[in-house]
Image (spheres, rainbow, N blue to C red):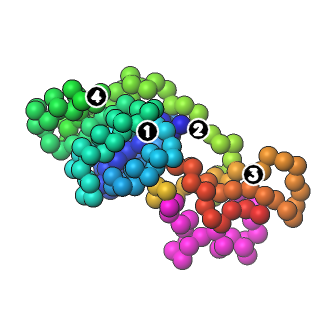
Amino acid sequence: MKDILIVEDNVEERERLRDIFTGKGYSVVCCDAAEKAEGVLATQGFRLVILDIGLGDKSGSYLFNQINALQQRPQIIIFTGNPSVHLKERFLQSGAVDYVVKGSADARKDAFLKRALELIGDPQSGDSGGIDLEKFVSHYVAESSRNLFYDSSGTFAPCEGCGGTQYSVVFSHKPQLPPEIIGEIRCTQCGTIYEGSVG
């Protein structure tokens, strides 16, 4: 189970929140649309969801109801630019644990971290036991073969599950020797297995 799912379509705000929580060790998955979030929620569990209700593809209210219906329901913080007292009351009565207005004091780094700690406690260990892909490529792959791991822009291709570009190499748990090394490359944010697996 991951710690936090962030559903926010503004890239700057999404990256700010991601950096706030990953900087404290929380495992974080980010989505920029409700449909992507639904796909992630279908395969993974979360302890906390930070949900923007002004999404471009589907209403955040729709996604809020979908999350509320999950068997293992995470806690939900509504994160919005709408300061409506009536909207806040509606979401809190429907099960949200907080309603944070963008740009407010509650949306600042320290306040958000404090609230997350109150709601879900310390980060859970989501370590898969793998090696960071960047480290793996630079230490264990011949320089002439390293370009096989990168796309045309010279970076790792975005994960199909969450759009992240951080991966770890997770090796098969059985005795093995070169030249046959079997393993998988997984997105560190959502766990999606990259098609270009090792072996």
Secondary structure of the residue carrying tag 1 is strand
Residue holding disc 4: 95
Q: Amino acid at mark 4?
A: Gly
Q: Is residue 132 visible?
A: yes
Mark 3 or mark 4: name the one nearer the start of the chain: 4
Answer few, some or many: residues within 10 Å of disc 2's Cα (few below 14, many 20 plus, some between 14 and 19): some
Comparing marks 4 and 1, which lies closer to the viewer?
Answer: 4
The disc, 2 or 4, on the residue closer to the chain's N-terminal end is 4
Relative side of 143 to 160, left or right: right
Q: Residue at x 46, y 59 (%)?
A: 163
Which quarter of the image is occupied by the C terminus?
A: bottom right
Q: CA distance from mark 3 to mark 4?
A: 41 Å
Looking at marks 1 and 2 on the same chain, the residue that comes earlier in the sequence is marked by 1
- Residue bearing mark 1: 4
* Distance CA(mark 1)–CA(mark 2): 12 Å
Residue 123 in the image: x percent, y percent?
51, 31
Q: Secondary structure at mark 4?
A: loop
Instruction: State which quadrant residue 167 falls in.
Output: bottom right
- Residue 124 covered by magenta stretch: no
Residue 152 is one of the magenta-drawn residues: yes
CA–CA distance between discs 4 and 1? 17 Å
Above or below: residue 72 compared with residue 37? above
Q: Position of residue 80 (x, y in %)?
A: 21, 43
Q: Quadrant of residue 83?
A: top left
In this orientation, does residue 19 appear?
no
Magenta region: 135-160
Q: Which residue is disc 3 drawn over?
A: 171
* Residue at the spot of label 2: 126
- Residue at position x 69%, y 56% from top? 184
Do the residues under discs 3 and 4 have CB atoms within 8 angstroms?
Answer: no
Residue under the point 49% across and 38% down: 45
